[in-house]
Image (cartoon, rainbow, N blue to C red):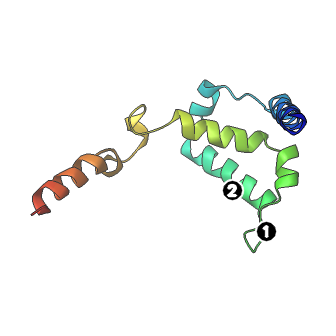
């Protein structure tokens, strides 16, 4: 029983610390980024926190995650269904075209 209580306390403190460092990003602001701005932010995050061997500096990223939060909010807010004008027609229709290829080639 004591171990379960200690474990629950650690989980609670962990969750509290996660909530306290979270930086809310307005979805509308994220969706207003252009593709070029989004790519620049993502490139900046990678350049700062990933080394030449592909290792991620999670400690530094945990203290400097504002740009990553904006990148993730952009991905969550912008997709071919919600903003089709931002995506080439081939991407918007990829699902339908794949279904058609599947239907035609299926024995």
Residue most extreme to the front: 1
**How far is disc 1 from disc 2 in space, using C-alphas?**
12 Å
For label 1, the crowd category at 10 Å Cα-Cα, with few meaning under 14, some 14 to 19 and many 20 or more, is few
Residue at 73% x, 28% y is 24
Residue at 45% x, 38% y is 79
Marks 1, 2: nearer the viewer: 1
Question: Helix, strand, or loop for circle 2?
Answer: helix
Of 105 and 95, nearer the camera is 105
Of 39 and 1, nearer the camera is 1
Residue at 68% x, 38% y is 70
| Disc 1 to disc 2: CB gap under 8 Å | no
Please determine whether, in this image, residue 6 is positioned above or below residue 60: above
Earlier in the chain: of badge 1 and badge 2, it is 2
In the image, residue 85 lies at what x, y percent?
39, 37
The residue beneath circle 1 is 51
For label 2, the crowd category at 10 Å Cα-Cα, with few meaning under 14, some 14 to 19 and many 20 or more, is few
Work out whether residue 36 can be spotted.
yes
Q: Which mark is residue 63?
A: none
The residue beneath circle 2 is 43
In the image, residue 6 lies at what x, y percent?
90, 36
Find residue 56 and report its image quarter.
Answer: bottom right
Residue at 78% x, 39% y is 66
């Amino acid at each position: 029983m004591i171990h379960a209580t200690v474990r629950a306390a650690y989980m609670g403190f962990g969750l509290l610390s996660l909530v306290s460092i979270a930086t809310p990003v307005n979805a509308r602001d994220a969706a207003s980024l252009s593709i070029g701005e989004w790519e620049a932010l993502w490139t900046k995050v990678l350049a700062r926190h990933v080394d030449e061997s592909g290792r991620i500096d999670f400690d530094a990223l945990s203290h400097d995650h504002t740009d990553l939060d904006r990148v993730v909010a952009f991905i969550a807010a912008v997709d071919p269904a919600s903003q089709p004008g931002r995506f080439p027609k081939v991407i918007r229709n990829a699902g339908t075209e794949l279904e058609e290829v599947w239907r035609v080639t299926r024995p």
